[in-house]
């Protein structure tokens, strides 16, 4: 079968590997779609080399079909599934608190362990969720990033009538904006890429584009009060510097982006306005269930985010395009091609 190998130094190669043999509690999956994620771009740039093994196989935004599964499981051949790619110990302090996705011994499939960027993948059945037939393959491949967004918006307690500012209009930022808007919030998105600005406007969002001062725009928008919630999804150190300056008294700052280096932040508004700053990573199982419901019901149409389908053999080029500012939102690797 085909598989991808991370060689480091910004290089992925495609080669042959034996088809995996599933263990007693595992299902064998035929992978259909894998999304290229912002975390994958960090891997590509070498930011996660302390976690990703040389010659490892990445890919955690996976939609697949069951080839075989244990008889005692609820899955059978032909079932359409997505993979919740977290492995946790169940006994550490975080797990006992209920934060299994923040386990002190956490392993993420497709980062720390073998992922889905290959034709076949053996996965523990307790990591699988069924995909409704109402969702097309491309939409099903967006469930994992949608689960990130539902977790982030839920953790920030966004509610109807809130004013919400999202820094960064990439795939996760756009999904956060869609989920917040679906909850009844008034949402604006800060984005400097002109193509993405136009894309966001086509989705009906008011944008704060290149050349505009987000702090000044927010002051005018909120009569000087500041927004209720701000999400930092850009990964830009310049944004981190101002992110606390756009939030109202008792407002919330949610940090989503991975910042590879320590970044200065203006803490005076944290003190002066008694702000709450949250980190938000991965997702709960409830966030996955909500994501599937939102997509399957049509409450949110995320299909416009899929910009391009590529075969596995074009993974290297897909990474370069996604990182290089090409006019794309979400690139999916089509393992059926």
Image (tube, helix red, strand yellow):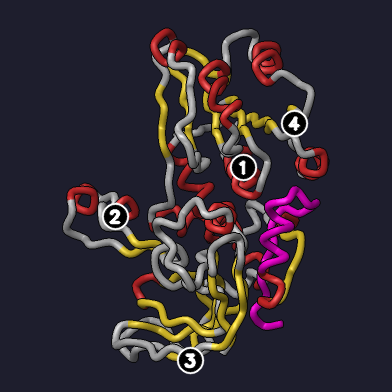
Report the residue at 74% width, 36% height from top. Answer: 205
Distance between the alpha carbons at the discs numbered 1 and 3: 38 Å
Q: Is 66 covered by the magenta stretch?
A: no
Badge 2: residue crowd in 10 Å (few <14, some 14–19, many ≥20): many
Element at badge 1? helix
Lower sequence index among marks 1 and 2: 2
- Which residue bears the numbered disc 1? 173
Is residue 231 visible in the rendered image? The answer is: yes
Does the residue at mark 2 contact the one at mark 4 (Cβ under 8 Å)? no
Comparing marks 2 and 3, which lies closer to the viewer? 3
Lower sequence index among marks 2 and 3: 3
On screen, residue 48 versus residue 296, left or right, reads left
Does the residue at mark 1 contact the one at mark 3 (Cβ under 8 Å)? no
Does the residue at mark 1 contact the one at mark 2 (Cβ under 8 Å)? no
Lower sequence index among marks 2 and 4: 2
Q: Which residues are magenta?
A: 316-337
């Amino acid at each position: 079968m085909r598989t991808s190998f991370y060689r480091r130094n910004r290089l992925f190669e495609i080669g042959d590997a034996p088809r995996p043999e599933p263990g007693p509690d595992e299902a064998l999956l035929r992978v259909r779609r894998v999304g290229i994620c912002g975390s994958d771009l960090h891997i590509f740039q070498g930011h996660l080399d302390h976690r990703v093994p040389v010659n490892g196989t990445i890919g955690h935004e996976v939609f697949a079909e069951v080839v075989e599964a244990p008889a005692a499981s609820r899955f059978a051949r032909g079932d359409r599934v997505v993979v919740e790619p977290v492995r946790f110990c169940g006994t550490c302090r975080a797990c006992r608190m209920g934060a299994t996705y923040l386990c002190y011994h956490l392993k993420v499939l497709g980062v720390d362990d073998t992922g889905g960027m290959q034709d076949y993948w053996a996965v523990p059945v307790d990591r699988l969720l069924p995909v409704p037939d109402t969702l097309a393959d491309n939409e099903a491949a967006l469930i994992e990033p949608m689960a990130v967004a539902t977790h982030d918006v839920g953790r920030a307690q966004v509610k109807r009538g809130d004013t919400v500012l999202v820094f960064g209009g990439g795939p996760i930022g756009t999904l956060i904006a869609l989920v917040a808007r679906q909850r009844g919030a008034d949402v604006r998105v800060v984005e400097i890429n002109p193509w993405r600005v136009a894309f966001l406007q086509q989705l009906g969002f008011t944008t704060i584009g290149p050349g505009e001062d987000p702090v000044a725009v927010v002051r005018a928008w909120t009569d000087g009060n500041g927004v209720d919630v701000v999400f930092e999804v850009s990964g830009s150190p310049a944004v981190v510097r101002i992110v606390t300056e756009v939030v109202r008294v008792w407002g919330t700052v949610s940090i989503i982006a991975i910042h590879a280096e320590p970044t200065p932040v203006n803490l005076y508004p944290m003190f002066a306005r008694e702000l709450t700053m949250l980190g938000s990573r991965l997702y709960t199982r409830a966030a996955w269930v909500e994501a599937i419901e939102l997509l399957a019901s049509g409450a949110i149409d995320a299909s416009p985010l899929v910009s391009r389908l590529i075969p596995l053999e074009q993974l290297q080029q897909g990474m370069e395009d996604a990182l290089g500012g090409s006019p794309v939102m979400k690139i999916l690797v089509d393992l059926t091609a």
